[in-house]
Amino acid sequence: MIKSKFVPLFLIFLGLISILSYILRPDPSTDIYLNIIYLIPSFLATILGIDLLKRMGVKNKKGNIYLLLTIAVALWFVGESLWFLYKIVLDLDHFPSYIDVVYLAAYPIFFVAFWKEYKLNKIIWTTKKILISSISAVTLTSLTGYYGIYMSYDAEASFWENSFSILYGVGDLAIIFVLILIIMIVSSYQKGKFLSIWIYFLLAMLFTIFADILYAMYYQEYNKGIKIFQYLDLLWIISFIFFAQGFYKANKIIFEIQSNLINKK
Amino acid sequence: MLVKERVLESALKIISDNLGDYTAQLYKDFYNSQEPEIIIISVSELMTDMLGAQNADKIVQELKQNI
């Protein structure tokens, strides 16, 4: 296990460095330093996910869920790295391309992971839960449906460009559905130690969906490199930091149980 | 299968599913010398600590059905 107690502190430090860098550097869209900073959180989340899998194994139910989450995060890391290579290093226009396939492949994997966790917890639906879920679902679905699907259609764009743009919107809709599931999962954990893990995953997915919705709303300004809209990257960075912290927390909890048992022997 | 074996098997499956195979292996060493009632109490406490009382109750009810 990555034993360092400094992992959470490092993740906070990374978040602060990222925020400061985006504010201080003049042109985030083409800045190679910022684009490297952007890759670090998804790389760390992937490494911490793999580290958790080494402790958990993957043939048990929770291990299988963490495996799916790690694969999904790893796919986004690979997608971000390829994007960095093509856009920043080689300066190639690449939409749509196989990089988008890598990004999009993560969405159904996230969906399956959270669905499995939901089924594992045998959630009991109360009126309050149904009400909160319905309001959240209608609000987020309306925003994503309008900006992510309806507004993303461009009559002048090619069939493939439109298809991929719409697919991102559909992926976000799937994420909204799992967000509702994660809220139910979190509520079922009450005061259990696993609560913190799933709060981190919930925050990670919330930041992702807000970043995606805002990107869908302002993608033209973002792609023109207007600085204020480049701050959207920070939401994705924070999302990966929460994923990393969730994996680390799960690993730490299990490590402590195992250590106690070994010490009792 | 004896009651203890059934409870032990179910308890280890619960621990493995939530905390991984190695943790279950460590608990197996501890549970081998324990009575079924003690195993159930131990699993109940562990799951309450990890998953919260509501989730733990559901799991422990299923475990008790093995007696």
Image (tube, helix red, strand yellow):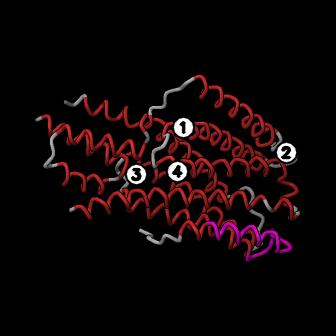
Mark 2 Cα-neighbour bin, 10 Å: few <14, some 14–19, many ≥20:
few
Disc 2 and disc 3 on one polypeptide chain: yes
- In the rendered image, which residue does mark 2 sit on? A154
Estimate the spatial distance between the alpha carbons at disc 1 and disc 4, rounded to whole Å.
11 Å
Q: Quadrant of the N terminus of chain A?
A: bottom left
The mark lying in front, picked from 2 and 3, is 3
Amino acid beneath label 3: Gly
Of the numbered discs 3 and 1, the one sitting upstream in the chain is 3
Q: Residue at x 54, y 37 (%)?
A: A187
Classify residue A53 as left or right of residue A220: left
Amino acid beneath label 1: Ser
Residue A187 is tagged as 1
The magenta span reads A12-33
Amino acid beneath label 4: Ser
Estimate the spatial distance between the alpha carbons at disc 2 and disc 3, rounded to whole Å.
42 Å
Classify residue B63 as left or right of residue B32: right
Between A97 and A9, the one lying in front of the other is A9
Of the numbered discs 4 and 2, the one sitting upstream in the chain is 2
Chain letter of disc 2 in the image = A
Determine whether label 2 and label 3 are within 8 Å by CB.
no
Most distant residue in the left direction: B2
Disc 4 and disc 3 on one polypeptide chain: yes
Estimate the spatial distance between the alpha carbons at disc 3 and disc 1, rounded to whole Å.
21 Å
Q: Residue at x 46, y 52 (%)?
A: A66
Residue A21 vertical position relative to residue A209 in the rendered view, above or below: below
